[in-house]
Image (tube, grey):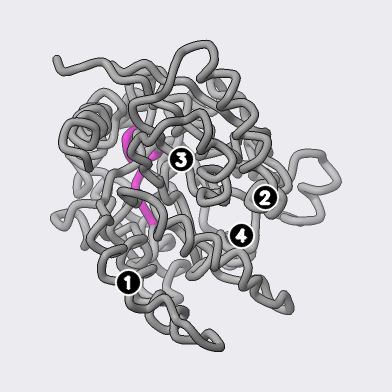
């Protein structure tokens, strides 16, 4: 075991996957982590304003514990501003930026203009950090595809000459997922249970999921389904409004406490994604770990999350989600056999495995001067 470091962890948006990441890292690391967090709301204000309030919290921690050996900052912050606010007391620790997402390639809702100021904060964060960690290679490569054009689209004095040195700082370090409490199941329900476990927002495209279920119901397919995740319909009126006749087949809707969610995973037969945006996919890793049959788009981060030997049984192309789901429901037993071993393969994302990467890399950054 290497040196125990003092790590200052900044999470300006402590909710959902960000919260799970920060708390999982704090729980499993061998290092001494001091977590500074703000509630997961008003994301634009977190990007614009959290640097000052997080700097105030950082000074309290430094006064109590001394200067950190390394800073690990989640991306929803103006990192350059935070370093300016802390320069008189923080010392000169190496700074790692963790990119859960970015605004350069995040899909903008229809009718909403893009916010260029948010994109420039993302760029400045990458320029100032000593290392930049991405949750997937897909995320890193998609951002690299967008950066050159973004940096050219300025009035003058472009930052394009800084692109190469910024790219050299980029690494892929996956999110850890709490999988030890999730058990694999080989059973198949009657009727089967379909799970949609994503945020109920435009970038996850819930409308496409509803349309597929309605089509299959009209064809006489037998199934129950559940929707979970933040903002998913909870009260009876919202459920009826969203699902109509399908409401009679719903077994759970709305965000669930962790124990109830894990219980639901144990009963899940099929997990579906209709997302137009996904940089990692914690909820899919959880469902596959529990033995669910995947019905996923062959794009985004999913082909990276699912090892290639299961690609023929996991993915649909373009708009073929309904066709794929229909085929799975018709032949559940064979699909279950075809994904044998996939649940075990997901265990590579368990915090018990991933934490070794985080801990060792943090130590290397400090030892090697990044």
Q: Do the residues labelled 1 and 3 touch (CB within 8 Å)?
A: no
Q: Nearer the viewer, residue 34 or 165?
A: 165
Specify few, some or many for label 2: CA neighbours under 10 Å numbering under 14, 14-19, or 20 or more. Answer: some
Q: How crowded is mark 3: few (under 14 residues within 10 Å), some or many (20 or more)?
A: many
Residue at 64% over, 63% down: 202
The residue singled out by tag 3 in the image is 73
With 226 as the anchor, is 27 left or right in this view? Answer: left
Residue tagged 1:
163
Q: On the image, numbered disc 4 is attached to which residue? A: 206
Are dots 2 and 4 in contact, CB under 8 Å?
A: no
Q: Nearer the viewer, mark 2 or mark 4?
A: 2
Extreme residue toward the top, this view: 64
Query: How far is mark 2 from mark 4, CA to CA?
Result: 22 Å
Report the mark closest to the observer, 2 or 3.
Answer: 3
Task: Please tell me whether mark 2 sits on a helix, a strand or a loop.
Answer: helix
- Secondary structure at badge 4 equals helix
**Which is nearer the N-term, disc 1 or disc 2?**
2
Q: What element carries label 3?
A: strand
**Could you tell me how far apart the alpha carbons at marks 4 and 3 are, in whole angstroms?**
31 Å
Confirm or deny contact between disc 4 and disc 1 (CB under 8 A): no
Position in image of residue 15 (x %, y %): 60, 36
Q: What element carries label 1?
A: helix
Q: Position of residue 79 (x, y in %)?
A: 51, 48
Pick whichever of labels 4 and 1 is earlier in the sequence: 1
Q: Distance between the residues labelled 1 and 3?
A: 20 Å
Q: Is residue 79 above or below residue 120?
A: above
Inter-mark Cα distance, 4 to 1:
36 Å
Which contiguous range is marked in magenta?
Answer: 287-295
What residue is shown with label 2? 43
């Amino acid at each position: 075991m290497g040196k125990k470091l003092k790590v200052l962890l900044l999470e300006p948006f402590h909710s959902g996957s960000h919260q799970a990441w920060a708390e999982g890292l704090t729980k499993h690391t061998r290092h001494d982590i001091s977590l500074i967090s703000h509630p997961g709301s008003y994301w634009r204000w977190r990007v614009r304003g959290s640097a000052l309030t997080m700097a105030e919290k950082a000074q309290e921690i430094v006064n109590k514990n001394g200067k950190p050996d390394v800073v690990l900052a989640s991306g929803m912050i103006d990192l350059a501003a935070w370093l300016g606010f802390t320069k008189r007391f923080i010392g000169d620790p190496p700074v790692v930026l963790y990119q859960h997402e970015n605004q350069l390639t995040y899909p903008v809702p229809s009718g909403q203009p893009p916010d260029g100021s948010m994109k420039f904060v993302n760029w400045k964060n990458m320029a100032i950090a000593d290392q930049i960690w991405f949750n997937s290679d897909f995320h890193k490569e998609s951002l690299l595809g967008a950066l050159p054009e973004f940096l050219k689209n300025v009035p003058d004095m472009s930052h394009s000459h800084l692109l190469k040195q910024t790219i050299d700082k980029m690494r892929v370090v996956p999110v850890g997922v709490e999988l030890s409490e999730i058990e694999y199941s080989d059973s198949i329900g009657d009727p089967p249970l379909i799970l949609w476990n994503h945020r109920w927002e435009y970038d996850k495209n819930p409308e496409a999921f509803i349309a597929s279920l309605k089509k299959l119901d009209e064809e006489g397919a037998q199934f129950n389904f559940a929707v979970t995740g933040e903002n998913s319909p909870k009260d009876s009126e919202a459920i009826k409004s969203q699902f109509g006749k399908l409401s009679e087949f719903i077994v759970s809707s709305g965000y669930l406490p962790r124990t109830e969610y894990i219980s639901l995973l144990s009963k899940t037969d099929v997990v579906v994604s209709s997302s137009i945006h996904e940089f990692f996919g914690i909820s899919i890793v959880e469902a596959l770990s529990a033995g669910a049959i995947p019905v996923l788009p062959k794009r985004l981060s999913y082909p990276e999350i699912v090892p290639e030997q299961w690609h023929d049984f996991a993915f649909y192309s373009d708009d073929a989600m309904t066709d794929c789901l229909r085929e799975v429901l018709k032949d559940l037993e064979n699909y279950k056999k075809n994904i044998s071993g996939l649940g075990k393969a997901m265990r590579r994302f368990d915090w018990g495995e991933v934490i070794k990467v985080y801990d060792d890399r943090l130590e290397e950054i400090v030892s090697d001067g990044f």
